[in-house]
Amino acid sequence: MRQMGRARLEAFSDGVFAIIITIMVLELKVPEEGTLAALVALCPKFLGYVLSFVYVAIYWNNHHHLCHTVKHVSAGVMWANLHLLFWLSLFPFVTGWAGEHEHDALPFAVYGIVLLAAALAWLVLQRAIVSTGAVLREALGTDLKGKLSPLLYLTGIGVSFVQPWLAFLVYATVALMWVVPDRRIERWLAAESQSQSRAK
């Protein structure tokens, strides 16, 4: 039986990423009135959209690099990838809920839970790729940001029951950590390519 290539895995994932962003932007309803007050009232939803868009963009960028380390698309890699996409597909729901109830703790806690679940799913996908023989472990190194992020998400979930807007700031802090391009895999792939070129 012919095995699925990494190009198909990446193409399917790209389609899901695009749908997630499309759903999120469609949740931004046009103000009923053409006034500044009506536009200001939309701010909580818009800020939530911006944060979630940044998260989706971060995952898409890093997923692109991650796919280039895949040597063999096993069943484990496919299911781990679908597991990640499942949690990411919940972003529009939790973004909309938190935007509608910006003063309530539970929507912000659930938002953090989804962020945490997506981060853990990302780690599962990395392990699944490593188990296929990919040398991803060398490219990742200590992965400090990957270990710190779940702790900050847990902090945000707890803080949401004190002040929801503080939880938003915690989640935004994690996004800022990752918005700086993570070039570990890119650098490693470039080094590997140069090494192979010299060998020829």
Image: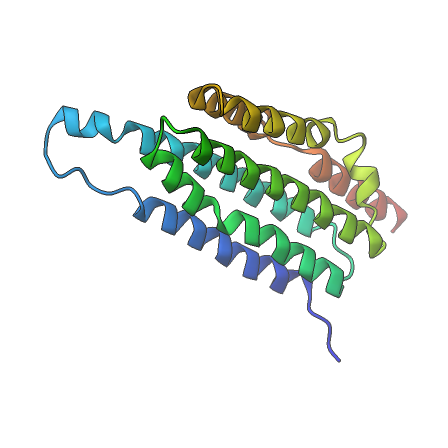
| On-image quarter of the N terminus | bottom right
Residue drawn at the location 56% of the way across and 49% of the way down:
87
Taking depth in this image into account, of 85 and 68 the one nearest to the observer is: 85
Q: Does residue 32 appear in this view?
A: yes
Q: Where is residue 94, by image quadrant?
A: top left
Q: Does residue 73 appear in this view?
A: no
Depicted 30 relative to depicted 146: above or below: below
Residue drawn at the location 56% of the way across and 54% of the way down:
86
In the drawing, does residue 56 fall left or right of residue 185? Answer: left
How many numbered marks appear? 0
Residue drawn at the location 42% of the way across and 21% of the way down:
165
Furthest toward the bottom, the residue is: 1
Taking depth in this image into account, of 98 and 45 the one nearest to the observer is: 98
Which percent across, then down, holds residue 34? Answer: 10, 33
In the drawing, does residue 168 fall left or right of residue 86? Answer: left
Which percent across, then down, holds residue 8? Answer: 61, 64
Which percent across, then down, holds residue 119? Answer: 63, 39
Which percent across, then down, holds residue 48? Answer: 39, 33
